[in-house]
Image (tube, rainbow, N blue to C red):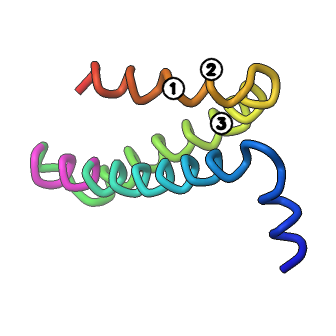
């Protein structure tokens, strides 16, 4: 447990972990909604939905380290505020 205490004692890390947890929940909801849209809305197969979900996950896997580097270099505030704004405007 001391390892967790040391990590959570880093200034600003606890809010970042909370944001990351909520982001992971949103990613799961995105994949589920995308699967249902492809299968039910576009009348395609689950295989097609799996391909679209794989492309989404690949994009997130490639973008995750880039976002991590941005957070390390620019700070949490400049990197964690814009994406929700962009997402709310696109939907």
Does the magenta run of residues contain 79? no
Q: Magenta region: which residues? A: 34-41
In the picture, the disc for residue 81 is 1
Task: Name the spot of residue 63 as percent of width and height, x first.
Answer: 63, 33
Q: CA distance from mark 2 to mark 3?
A: 20 Å
Which residue is labeled 2 in the image? 78
Task: Name the spot of residue 26 as percent of width and height, x first.
Answer: 40, 50
The reply, left or right, for residue 38 in relation to residue 85 is left
Kindly check if marks 1 and 2 are in contact, taking CB atoms under 8 A apart as contact: yes
The reply, left or right, for residue 19 in relation to residue 74 is left
Foreground pick, 39 / 19? 19
Residue lying at 23% horizontally and 27% vertically, measured from the top left: 91
Q: Is residue 2 above or below residue 71?
A: below
- Crowdedness near tag 3: few (<14), some (14–19) or many (≥20) residues, C-alpha within 10 Å: few
Q: Earlier in the sequence, mark 1 or mark 3?
A: 3
Q: Main secondary structure of the magenta part?
A: helix
User: Which residue is outermost to the bottom?
Assistant: 1
Q: Is residue 16 above or below residue 80?
A: below
In the picture, the disc for residue 62 is 3
Does the magenta run of residues contain 38? yes
Q: Is residue 5 above or below residue 48?
A: below
- Crowdedness near tag 2: few (<14), some (14–19) or many (≥20) residues, C-alpha within 10 Å: few
Task: Name the spot of residue 46 as percent of width and height, x first.
Answer: 27, 60
Foreground pick, 16 / 35? 16
Q: CA distance from mark 1 to mark 2?
A: 6 Å
Asked which secondary structure carries label 3, the reply is helix
Residue lying at 51% horizontally and 26% vertically, measured from the top left: 81
Asked which secondary structure carries label 2, the reply is helix
- Crowdedness near tag 1: few (<14), some (14–19) or many (≥20) residues, C-alpha within 10 Å: few
Residue lying at 47% horizontally and 41% vertically, measured from the top left: 55
């Amino acid at each position: 447990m001391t390892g967790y205490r040391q990590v959570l004692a880093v200034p600003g890390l606890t809010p970042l972990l909370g944001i990351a947890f909520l982001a992971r929940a949103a990613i799961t909801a995105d994949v589920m909604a995308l699967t249902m849209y492809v299968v039910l809305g576009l009348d395609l197969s689950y295989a097609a939905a799996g391909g679209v979900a794989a492309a989404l996950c690949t994009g997130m896997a490639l973008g995750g380290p880039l976002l991590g580097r941005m957070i390390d270099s620019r700070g949490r505030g400049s990197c964690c505020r814009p994406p929700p704004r962009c997402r709310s405007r696109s939907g």
